[in-house]
Each structure stands twice: as structure tokens, then as C-alpha cells.
Amino acid sequence: MLQRTFSIVKPDAVRNGHTASILAEIEKAGFKIVSIKRMSLTEEQAQGFYAVHAARPFFGALTQFMASGAIFPMVLEKENAIADLRKLMGATNPANAEEGTIRKKFAESIEANAIHGSDAEDTAAFEIGYFFAGYELK
Ligand code: CDP
Ligand code: MG
């Protein structure tokens, strides 16, 4: 089933000059980039995006980090896109990420871990709608 998911090249990866390399990995893996833009988040916007984690101890640091520099939010399309992107990303903590994954190659730490990817259909729909209008998703 052709499916869409949502991803972000996070501020650490943009700062470290890894954006193009990460996009190349995504395209090599067979994803179509449906829409992408460069922007920065306010802390309030980052809090809205990560609202599901509001009660977690890392929430304040995470949302400050996500507002700390430019990001590239994007919508990706492929068969089985949600699960396949999670596989390509690797574990949240790069110390546990498998060889060849984006986080293994490019992440700095469990917080500054280079890339976001939606974890389910409902979160993908929320996250796509948080960043993109319908007319940007043709
Ligand atoms: O991004 P992923 O779905 O793999 O992980 P998550 O559990 O949904 O957590 C969201 C983000 O919070 C992670 O990608 C990390 O940037 C950050 N995080 C953190 O700073 N410290 C943790 N112990 C867990 C997550
Ligand atoms: Mg997550």
C-alpha cells in the first residue's frame, strides 16, 4: 500500500552539514519527496509538535533543541513508508542504532539524533498537517 509519512532533518544534522547526505539516503531507499521546506520553529511550535511527550523529563530540552536552528520538514511517499523510514532511521539512541542507519551515521546523541520519523498512521497524519497545507502536498 502506497503510504505517506512525515520526517524532519533536525537542527543538529542541518548545523553539521548532513542535510544533503540524509536526503540522498532517503531517496536511495526508494522514497519520493512529496514536499519539503527549510524553516525554524519557535519553542511554542516545537512544544505543539511534540505534545505527546509533554510529561516526559526530556520535553523542555527537546523542544529547546528543536527550536535551536533550521530544520527541513518533509512528506515522504513509498510502499510501507512509515515502518520503512523508522527502519532506515535506526534506534532513537544512536549508540543502539544499527550499522548503515541514518542515526548511526549522522546523529550526535539521544537528543540530537539527526532525524524524526512518524511512528504510526495517526501520528503521520497529525504531523503532516502540523507542517504542510493541502495545496503543498500534490
Ligand atoms: O524520535 P523517536 O520516535 O525515535 O523517539 P521518541 O521516543 O518519540 O522521542 C522523541 C525525541 O525525543 C527523540 O527523537 C529524541 O530527540 C528525544 N529524546 C530525548 O531527548 N531523550 C530521550 N530519553 C528520549 C527521546
Ligand atoms: Mg517518536
Image (spheres, grey):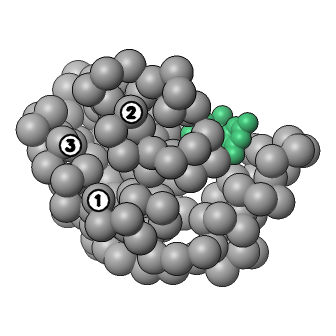
List x then y, in percent, for residue 91: 50, 26
Q: Is residue 67 above or below residue 123?
A: below
In space, the residues marked 3 and 2 are separated at their CA atoms by 14 Å
* Quadrant of the drawing holding the N terminus: top left
Circles 1 and 2 in contact, beta carbons < 8 Å: no
Count of numbered badges drawn on the protein: 3
* Label 3 or label 1, whichever comes before in sequence order: 1
Please state the horizontal and vertical placement of residue 92, each as a whole percent of the image. Answer: 56, 32
Residue at image x 35%, y 77%?
38
User: Element at badge 3?
Assistant: helix
Quadrant in the picture for residue 14: bottom left
In the picture, which quadrant includes the C terminus?
bottom left
Task: Return the disc, 3 or 2, that comes first in the chain's sequence.
Answer: 3
What amino acid type is highlighted by mark number 2?
Lys
Mark 3 vs mark 2, foreground winner is: 2
Identify the disc placed on residue 26.
3
Q: Check residue 93 in the rendering and tell me which mark sits there, or answer none.
A: none
Q: Give the structural element (helix, strand or loop) at label 1.
A: loop
User: Is residue 50 found left or right of 8 in the rendered image?
Assistant: right
Inspect this view and state whether residue 126 appears.
Answer: no
- Residue found 72% across the figure and 75% down from its top: 43
Q: Name the residue under label 1.
A: 18
Question: Which residue position holds label 2?
Answer: 104
